[in-house]
Image: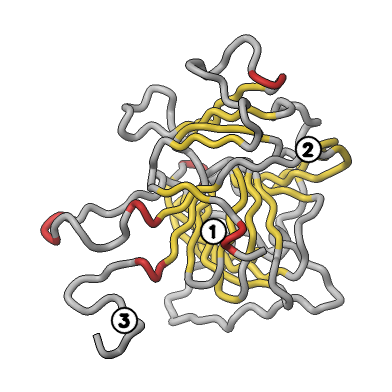
Amino acid sequence: MADDEFHYATGFGNEFTSEAVEGALPAGRNSPQRAPLGLYAEQISGTAFTQPRAVNRRTWVYRILPSAKHPPFRRIGNSNLRSTPFDEIDPDPNRLRWDPLPLPASDTPVDFIDGIFTVGGNGDVRTRDGMAVHIYAANKDMRDRYFADSDGELLVVPELNAIIAHTELGPLRVSPGEIAVIPRGIRFRVELPDPGGARGYLCENFGQAFTLPERGPIGANGLANERDFLAPHAAFEERAGDVQVVTKFAGNLWAADYDHSPLDVVAWHGNYAPYKYDTANFMVLGTVSFEHPDPSI
């Protein structure tokens, strides 16, 4: 699917409203006794409930089935995924570098989750402090598998080929040159639309959510503009059948077998949502930032 086949809303930290079916959003109330269309009202909280309005992050979702309708999670292997504190080996003072992570062999299907390889990081995931850097290399779509990071938000930086992140709040197509952020706890699955697989970087932020830097003495304009950040429109999966949902919690992976897709949000409103940004829109200072297609100008 090309990017122009997706629908996005614009803004950074805005209050968005989106519905995949007309009438799915309740009017005037967040959680009526009977939500429209027989849906279930839930709130996804990105900050404490009592935070001031300026920093409060939350989104109301209206879904086909309650998100708690699933069996218990069980521990599964972490594969090449690690979490802070990195105290398994002694720190090495020498200069280190790494080669690009090779793509999986064509006869070895590897999805986004299994393709994550941890490079390093700092802080401690248990105290919500610090970050981790990972590389992903995958050649298989996540059809019946979903992922959520309960430890931190994920900044996705594709390096080779695009990915499509189907999230609870809608899909994002992210290509090289773009970045995307999936907030803590938001469930998603990854499709690989380009042949040959995909590779890129992940910044796992354990602390406060990403914000835009203040411009200060540079004035009102420049850097990244809020209008260039894109949030997804509501889209839902109404499907029955066995799927696996993997969550990262306290540095380890846990899994549960659902009998339905967790991406069943028909409508939502709020300011806690995934978003993407095209880095070509970044306006640097002191130089010419954009080259006009007409060289005579």
Where is residue 94 shown, x and y percent of the image? 44, 80
Q: Residue furthest bottom?
A: 296
At mark 1, the secondary structure is loop
Gap between marks 3 and 2 measured at Cα: 45 Å
Q: Mark 1 Cα within 10 Å, few/some/many (few <14, many 20+)?
A: few
At mark 3, the secondary structure is loop
Location of mark 2 (residue): 238
Q: Which circle, 1 or 2, is nearer the viewer?
A: 2
Residue depicted at 24% across the width and 85% down the height: 297
Where is residue 268 shown, x and y percent of the image? 56, 32
Label whose residue precedes the other's in the sequence (1 or 2): 1
Disc number for residue 13 = none
Location of mark 1 (residue): 87
Q: Amino acid at mark 1?
A: Asp
Is 56 above or below relative to 8? above
Q: Nearer the viewer, residue 232 or 137?
A: 232
The quadrant where residue 33 appears: top right
Please give left or right for residue 222 compared with residue 167 in the image. left
Residue depicted at 50% across the width and 81% down the height: 97
Residue depicted at 81% across the width and 50% down the height: 144
Q: Which circle, 3 or 1, is nearer the viewer?
A: 3
The quadrant where residue 42 appears: top right
Please give left or right for residue 105 compared with residue 97 in the image. right
Residue depicted at 20% across the width and 59% down the height: 221
Gap between marks 1 and 2 measured at Cα: 43 Å
Circles 1 and 2 in contact, beta carbons < 8 Å: no
The quadrant where residue 110 appears: bottom right
Label whose residue precedes the other's in the sequence (3 or 1): 1
Label whose residue precedes the other's in the sequence (3 or 2): 2
